[in-house]
Amino acid sequence: MTDRIHDRYAIDGKIPAPDEMHDIVVVGAGPAGLAAALEAARAGRQVLLIDEHPVPPALAGSDVPLWFGGRATAALQAPERLLETLVENEPLIAECFEAGVDVRLGTMAWGLWRNREACGVLPRAMLGLADGQKSWTVGFDRLILATGARDCALAFAGWDQPGVMGALAFDALVTRYDAFAGRRVVILGSGDLALETARIAAGRGIDVAAMIEVRDAVQGQGTMPDAPVLTGHRLIRAEGGIDGVERVIIAGPDGAEQTLVCDTVILAIDAVAAIELAEVAGAAVVTEPLRGGAVIPGGAGEVLPGVWMAGAATGLMGPRALAEAQARAVMAQALGHTAELPDVPAAFDRMAYRAEWLRALVATSPDTTMVCQCEDVSRADLVGVQPPRYLPRPDKMGARSIDTLLEDGPPDAEQVKRLTRAGMGLCQGRRCREQVSLLLAMSANLPPKSAPRGNWRVPVRPVPLGVMADWQETEAMSAGWDVWFGIPTQWIPYPDIGTEAETRKLATLAGSMHL
Amino acid sequence: MNVHYDVIVIGAGVTGLSSAWWLARDGLSVLVLDKGVVGAEASSRNGGGASHYQSPLFAEEQRLWPMMDDLLGYPTEHQRERVIIATNEHDLDHYHFVADNCDEMGWPVDRIDGQTAREMVPIAGDNCLGGIHFRFGGHANPQRTVQAFAWALKDQGGRVIQHCPVTEITTEGGKVTGVTTPQGHFSCGALVVAAGPQIAGLLAPIGIDVPLMAGRAEMIVTEPAPLMALGGVDGNGLYGRQTMRGNLAFGGGPHEWIDTAAQGPRARPTTPLSRSLARRVAELFPRASHLNVIRSWAGIVENTPDGRPILDRIDNVVIATMSGVGFGLSPATGHAVRDLVVDGACSFTDIAKLTLARFAGLEPDWREQRGWLPLTGA
C-alpha cells in the first residue's frame, strides 16, 4: 500500500496471502498429473499433488465431476476404504509418495484466481481447495493443470434415468474405484474412446451387449472388441424401471427395430477437456473441433503466466503413455528446461461426429425430452427460449423463440442460459452444456465450430456454503465490509437531501452505511 | 446508411430499455444500441432488490411493479415485500434506524423479534435476533426483467441492435444529431445515454463531463433451498434474495475500483471474496449452510461521487445513470426519462436534486480524495 488514500470499503488489501505456499502444485492425479509430479519430484522439487477422487458420495450422485449415472455401488459411501482402493489401483500414487510428493487425495480445486484486467487485489495467484470439511487457498510458483477430461452427455429418450452414464465415469468406477454396479452395457459410439470402453468392460467380465454407431463404419483405430458393433444404427430410446435402464430399442439401416437387454448405456461418443480452472483464471477459450470443442489455445504448455496444462485437459485423446510423455515434457518446460512435446496423433473432427450423433438422437426423441436434467428444461423449451415451468407463459412469451432472439444478433449462450435456466443447476451444466451449445448452433444455422458456449465460473465444483466459508477472515475484511459501495449519501432519503436531517443521518450512518 | 429515429438510447441495460419502452409506448420510434447483448452487465448481475425507499422514484416504482408482468407481457418474477434479519445487536440497531426512516416516509414496516423472524425465514438460526419486515418493496429476476423490457419494446415497434457499440455522438450547432457505429450512422431527434460506466467516455467528446467511477462487485449463488414464503430476505452485510427456483443469490462486501475502457469491461473476474460471502450467507442461514455454492460472478457498476443518480436533460440529450442502484427502480426510471425526453421535466416526482449541475464545483481530484482508484496488482 502506498501513501495514497484507500477507500475503507474497497477491497484494497483485504484478500490475504494464501494459506499455504508450494513450489509446484499439480492438479489431477491421472496419468498426466502423476507423470508430471514424479518428474518434478525426481528433479528435487517440492510438489503438492491434489486429486478430487474419491469424490463425496453426494457429489457423485449429482454427476460431478463425471457422469456416474447412478451406477456406482455402495462402496462410494465409504471414502476411507475407497482411498485404499484408489492407491491399490494406481501404482504411480505410491511412487509419488516414495518420491516425496505431498499427495492429497479427496481434495478438490474449485477456484483459481490471478490478478488480471479488472482485478488487482490478490497478493499473488492462488487456488481454492476444499476437502469435505473446509476450504483454503494455496499459492504456487508453478501450477500444472492436469485436470483430465469430463464426460460429454447427449440427450435421447430415456436418458434421464439411472444407468445412463459417461465413458469416463465408467472407466473411473471400474478401474479406479472397483465400484461399478452394472453387468451388461450398451456402448454408444465406436471411436477410440468407445473401443477403450469395450476393452475395459471385457477385462472385468462386464458384458457388452453391443456398440452402436450412427455412421456407416467403425470410427476408432484401436483393437476391435468381441462385442457386436452395429454401424448405421440409431438409438430410439432407453426403457427401464425403478432401478433405471433395463433395455434399449435401436433401429438398423433398414429401420427395423430391435431390443437389447442391458442395465447400463455408456455414452462413449466423445469426452470434453476439463478447462474449468484455466478459464476462470482468465485463459482464452477457443473451439477446436479436432481437440473436442472448447479448449485453451495452443495445447499442452504454458497457458497463463506460471500455469501449464498437459494431458486430456488440453483435448488430448490417446494412449496413456502419450499423456505421460506429454506431461513429463510440459513439467520439464515448467522447470525451465528445453523439452520437446511428443507428437499428437492426427485426430478427427470430434465436433462434427458429436453433432452427427446429436442430430440422430434429436431425430428419434420427442422435443419434450429433457436437455437439462437439473432444471427440467426440455429441448422444446430451450430452442423456444421459454421460462421454467413454475413461471406463467403468457401468449407473448409463447411467441418468443431462439429465432426472435437472433433478430437482435448472434446467439449468446449466457443469455439463453439465464432465460431458460438450462445449465444453471447443481451439476453446473456438466450434463448439458455441450448439447445446449450444439442445439443453439443448429437453431442458428451455425457450424459446430461456431457453437456459442456458456462459460465456467468459480466454484468449478459445487462447494457447500459452510465449507467454502472463510471462518478465519482477516480483521481488515470484517472491519471494511459494507453491503454495497459504502457511500453514505446514497442512502439518505431524498426529501432529507440538503436539510439538517441529512447531516444528522449521515452522522448515524457513518461507518455502518446500509448494512 | 442513415436511418432516423425519434429517440436513440445507448445501452440495453435495464435503465435504457425501460426508457426505450416508455418512449415507444408514446408512439415514438426508438432504437436501442448496445456494445454487447441485452442486460449483459450490471442489469443482470445484481441482487434483484426493489426496495429503495430513499429514492424519489420509489413511489412510482411501487405503483408499477405489481403491474409490470401484465404491462410488459412477459414474466419478471416480481415478488412483494422483504425481511432483513440481524445476527448481531449492531446490525439490529441499524435495521431499526432504517425502519425509522421508513416510518418517516410513510412506508409500512414491522419490527420483528427472533422467533417471528425464524418463522418467516425457516433457514435462519438461533443466532437470529430479529429484524425488520418491509410491508412494501420486493424483488424480481434481473435477467428476466431486462429481457422482458427488450421484448416489450420490440412489441411496441422499437428496435434493439446488439453488438453495436457507439463510437461517436455527432452534433450540429450544439445539438446531438445522431450516433456513429460500426453498422453505420443513425440520426435522432433526441439521445438517451444510459450506458453505465461508459457514459462518461461517450459524453466527454461533446463537452459533457459526467463524474463516474466504476467498481467491480461480487455475488454467489447456491443450489435451490426449499422455497420460503418470502424470498426477499437479507442481512448480515449481504443483499440478495431467494429466487423463485429456490437458489440463494447474495452479494455484498468490498468492491474493487477499476478503470474501464471505452468499449466496456473485457473481464469480470471474481476473487476469494466468494469465501467471505459464503461465510456470511452461512451465518445468516445456518440451516442452509450445507447447500452447495454453484456459481459466483462479478458485475461492473458505475458510481457518481455522492452515490445518487444523475437524471438530467441537457438540450436534446438525457443522461441516465442510477449510480449502482438501478434495477429495482427501473420501471419508474424509464417513466422519468420518457418525461424528460418528451416534456422536458419529470411529471410524477421531484428529481431536481439529481441534475448533473450539482457536480459543477467538484474537485478534479475527487477520486483521489475518496480513494476511488484502481489497484495495480501484485
Image (cartoon, grey):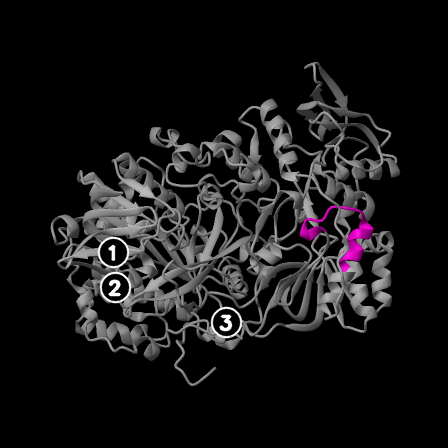
- The stretch drawn in magenta includes residue A326: yes
Question: x, y percentage for residue A286?
Answer: 57, 50
Give residue B205's mark.
2
The quarter of the picture where the C terminus of chain A appears is bottom left
Residue span colored magenta:
A312-327
Question: x, y percentage for residue A71?
Answer: 74, 38
Question: x, y percentage for residue A76?
Answer: 76, 47
CA gap between label 2 and label 1 equals 8 Å
Q: Chain of mark 1?
A: B
Mark 3 — residue? A121
Q: Nearer the viewer, mark 3 or mark 1?
A: 1
Does B71 sit above or below residue B271?
above
Write the residue at 71% across / 50% down: A312
Question: x, y percentage for residue A44?
Answer: 81, 74
CA gap between label 3 and label 1 equals 35 Å
- Outermost front residue: B1
Q: Nearer the viewer, mark 2 or mark 3?
A: 2
Report the front residue among A305 and A95.
Answer: A305
Q: Main secondary structure of the magenta part?
A: helix
Q: Are marks 2 and 1 in contact (CB under 8 Å)?
A: yes
